[in-house]
């Protein structure tokens, strides 16, 4: 079943992150939704893809749709080399048709949601 939900699709350019509104689908049996990226469901990277909740917070699920890291982050990048860049606070600034994600509190987590060094 597909549910309409407001999410944000990101476009990376230079040192800025741009986003735009989009729709996504619900994970079965949860209030979590598959994050929409590049006009489709988020890509699976290192066995995980990004999800969002009703408040727009980011988390991660595995390829079977099982939530591995509950949504708790203002924004999260996909996993790369065993870690993901995330932030708990930030803001979105509209730039043309897109939105820029701004934060001064970025940090990295591992697949168990533990904070790790860059």
Image (cartoon, rainbow, N blue to C red):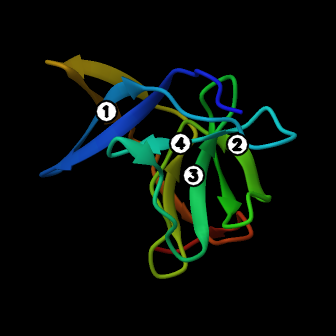
The residue wearing badge 4 is 35
Is tag 1's residue or tag 3's residue first in the polypeptide sequence?
Answer: 1
Farthest bottom residue in view: 81
Farthest right residue in view: 29
SS of the residue at dot 1? strand
The number of discs equals 4
Quadrant including the C terminus = bottom left
Residues under numbered marks 4 and 3 in contact, where contact means CB atoms less than 8 Å apart: yes
How crowded pointer 3 is (Cα within 10 Å; few <14, some 14-19, many 20+) is rated as many
SS of the residue at dot 3? strand
The residue wearing badge 1 is 19
The residue wearing badge 3 is 50
The residue wearing badge 2 is 71
> Does residue 14 appear left or right of residue 79 in this picture?
left
Is tag 4's residue or tag 3's residue first in the polypeptide sequence?
Answer: 4
Residue 13: x and y in percent read 15, 48
Q: Write down the quadrant of residue 18 in the picture.
A: top left
Residue 39: x and y in percent read 34, 41
Residue at the location (46% across, 60% down)?
43
| Cα separation between marks 4 and 2 | 11 Å
Closer to the camera in the image, 109 or 117: 109
């Amino acid at each position: 079943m597909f549910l309409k939900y407001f999410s944000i699709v990101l476009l990376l350019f230079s040192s800025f992150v741009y986003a735009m509104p989009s729709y996504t689908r619900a994970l079965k049996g949860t209030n979590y939704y598959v994050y929409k990226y590049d006009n489709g469901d988020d890509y699976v990277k290192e066995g995980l893809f990004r999800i969002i909740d009703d408040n727009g917070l980011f988390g991660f699920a595995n390829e079977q749709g099982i939530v591995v890291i509950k949504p708790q982050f203002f924004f999260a990048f996909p996993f790369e080399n065993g870690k993901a860049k995330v932030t708990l606070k930030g803001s979105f600034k509209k730039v043309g048709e897109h939105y820029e994600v701004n934060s001064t509190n970025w940090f990295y987590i591992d697949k168990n949601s533990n904070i790790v060094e860059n």
